[in-house]
Image: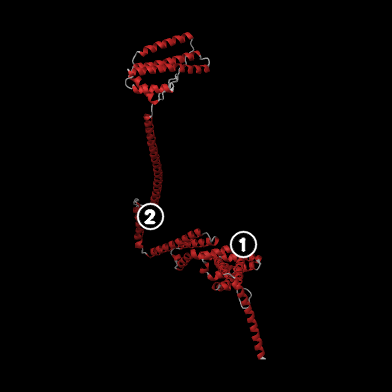
């Protein structure tokens, strides 16, 4: 019988081994078809997914998902661990990526890693969804829990904190079980307990020393020597604690009230000590005690520079010191105000100086430009303006004939006279620049060239006859134009034609004058 069982077991083992062998053979048959480059790419992709999963798990821990959704985060952690194990097999031998992941499993290592990564992400997604829902429904409770974290209440009152933390987690579990209504109904009671722990923690942090000092004063029977001062100190401590209970998050006011309570307690101790010393003094030392107190006031007065006021009672001496200090503060305020005004005035003066400096620079630039402009004017060539033709009045033919005869006589007489050197220089300047334009007479290019050549050859020996001849010619032409204008003034077009005609008629006269000038120069 046992032999049969052994044979049966052996047969089963062989059958299973054969199945496993077939599975491995199948995987082995598929493996050669996988390219090494593809295997390396798959390994790299899987590694990136695992790296991202590890980063997400670390972030989830900072968000306290492991506390809020403990079961889900445990599942996620385990799934990631399994995926990393399958990846380790593939990383060691990429050809095992598509091999069976287990003895009785048809899933490959690659598929198993992918499935575990998917399970990890699903668990984390569920935990994040639960977190969002819990923060929405239990917002007030989470606010107190955050404040307790900042106050480090877990370190000060660990047992109370852990107990309340457990109650808080129970409410979250109700939300996870789709019982949100039960969780919201239980929130007010939890908030009351959390707030009480917050108040207790703040009192411990800011008022614990003051409470201990008050207890020690009471234990030392300070009430026998300074009962009123001690009562005021105790009231300051109670007021500070009451304020903390009413508003445990107004830290600035809490600190101020705690400091005031500690100050009052220290004052109580000093008063009690002074009273106790006074009680121990014999009657003969009373005077010495009063003088010592007066000496203290005198030292203060001398340090301030105030007058000696020991001729007054002790309260009046104190009042005198106070009055002196107040006057000093007023004077100091006035000095500060004057300093501010002086600073403002100095800033204005500085600005004006800067403006003046800029203005001086601009003036220098203007003066330089003016100097350059004057230089340009002094070096520019002198251009003689053409004489303006005067509009002759309308005259009769007899008057025109008489005027022409008079001009002719004047021209003849001027031909025999001499002209000064200034007229010669003007003639030379007109020849050099070629810019002299005569409005009343039109000279052709050939006439102008002849005149220039004549002026250059007879630069110093030109006689008065040459200038006289040119002046006579110009005068004759002008007279002719005046006569023509007088006769044709009625018609502007006729006036223009007469000007052209007169200019043409004057040209032979100008040429004859030039010839005379040449002959005289040759002689």
Above or below: residue 520 compared with residue 70: above
Provide residue 288's location: percent of width, then percent of height.
34, 60
**Which residue is depicted at the point 38% across and 63% down?**
278
**Quarter residue 173 falls in:** bottom right
Quarter of the image that includes the C terminus: top left
Above or below: residue 389 compared with residue 162: above
Q: Crowding at label 1, few (<14), some or many (≥20) Cα neighbours within 10 Å?
A: few
The answer to whether residue 100 of the structure is visible from this angle is no
**How did the renderer colour the structure?**
secondary structure
**Quarter residue 365 falls in:** top left
Viewer-proximal residue, 301 or 359?
A: 359
Which mark sits nearer the N-terminus, 1 or 2? 1
**Pointer 1 and pointer 2: residues touching (CB < 8 Å)?**
no
Number of the front mark, 1 or 2: 1
Provide residue 354's location: percent of width, then percent of height.
39, 41
Q: Which residue matches tag 2?
A: 314
Quarter of the image that includes the N terminus: bottom right
**Quarter residue 183 falls in:** bottom right
Q: Which residue matches tag 1?
A: 136
Above or below: residue 429 compared with residue 418: below
Judged left or right of residue 200, residue 290 is left
Q: Secondary structure at mark 2?
A: helix
Judged left or right of residue 384, residue 487 is right
């Amino acid at each position: 019988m046992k032999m049969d069982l052994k044979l049966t077991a052996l047969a089963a083992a062989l059958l299973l081994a054969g199945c496993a062998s077939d599975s491995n053979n199948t995987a082995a048959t598929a493996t050669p078809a996988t390219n090494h480059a593809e295997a390396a790419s798959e390994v790299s992709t899987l590694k990136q997914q695992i790296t991202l999963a590890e980063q997400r798990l670390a972030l989830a821990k900072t968000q306290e998902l492991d506390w809020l959704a403990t079961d889900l985060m445990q599942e996620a952690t385990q799934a990631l661990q399994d995926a990393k194990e399958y990846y380790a097999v593939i990383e060691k031998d990429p050809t095992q990526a598509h091999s069976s992941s287990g003895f009785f499993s048809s899933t490959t290592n690659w598929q198993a890693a992918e499935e575990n990564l998917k399970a990890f992400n699903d668990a984390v997604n569920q935990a994040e969804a639960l977190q969002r829902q819990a923060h929405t429904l239990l917002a007030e409770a989470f606010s107190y829990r955050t404040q307790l974290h900042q106050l480090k209440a877990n370190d000060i009152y660990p047992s109370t904190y852990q107990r309340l933390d457990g109650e808080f987690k129970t409410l979250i579990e109700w939300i996870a079980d789709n019982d949100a209504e039960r969780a919201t109904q239980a929130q007010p009671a939890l908030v009351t307990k959390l707030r009480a722990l917050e108040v207790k923690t703040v009192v411990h942090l800011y008022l614990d020393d003051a409470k201990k000092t008050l207890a020690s004063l009471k234990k030392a029977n300070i009430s026998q020597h300074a009962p009123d001062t001690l009562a005021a100190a105790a009231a300051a401590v109670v007021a500070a604690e009451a304020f903390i209970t009413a508003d445990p998050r107004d830290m600035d006011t809490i600190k101020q009230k705690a400091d005031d309570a500690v100050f009052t307690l220290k004052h109580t101790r000093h008063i009690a000590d002074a009273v106790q010393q006074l009680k121990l003094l014999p009657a003969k030392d009373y005077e010495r005690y009063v003088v010592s107190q007066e000496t203290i006031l005198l030292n203060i007065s001398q340090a301030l520079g105030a007058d000696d006021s020991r001729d007054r009672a002790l309260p009046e001496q104190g009042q005198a010191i106070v009055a002196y200090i107040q006057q000093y503060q007023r004077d100091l305020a006035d000095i500060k105000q004057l300093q501010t005004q002086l600073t403002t005035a100095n800033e204005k003066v500085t600005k004006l100086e800067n403006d003046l400096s800029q203005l001086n620079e601009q003036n220098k630039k203007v003066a330089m430009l003016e100097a350059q402009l004057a230089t340009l004017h002094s070096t520019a060539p002198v251009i003689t303006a053409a004489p303006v033709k005067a509009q002759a009045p309308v005259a009769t033919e007899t008057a025109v004939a008489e005027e022409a005869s008079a001009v002719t006589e004047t021209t003849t007489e001027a031909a025999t006279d001499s002209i000064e050197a200034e007229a010669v220089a003007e003639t030379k300047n007109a020849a050099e620049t070629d810019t002299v334009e005569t409005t009343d007479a039109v000279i052709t290019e050939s006439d102008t060239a002849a005149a220039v050549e004549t002026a250059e050859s007879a630069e110093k020996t030109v006689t008065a006859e040459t200038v006289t001849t040119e002046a006579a010619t110009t005068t004759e032409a002008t007279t002719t134009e005046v006569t023509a204008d007088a006769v044709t003034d009625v018609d502007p077009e006729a006036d223009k034609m007469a000007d052209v005609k007169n200019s043409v008629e004057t040209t032979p006269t100008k040429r004859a004058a030039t010839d005379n000038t040449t002959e005289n120069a040759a002689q």
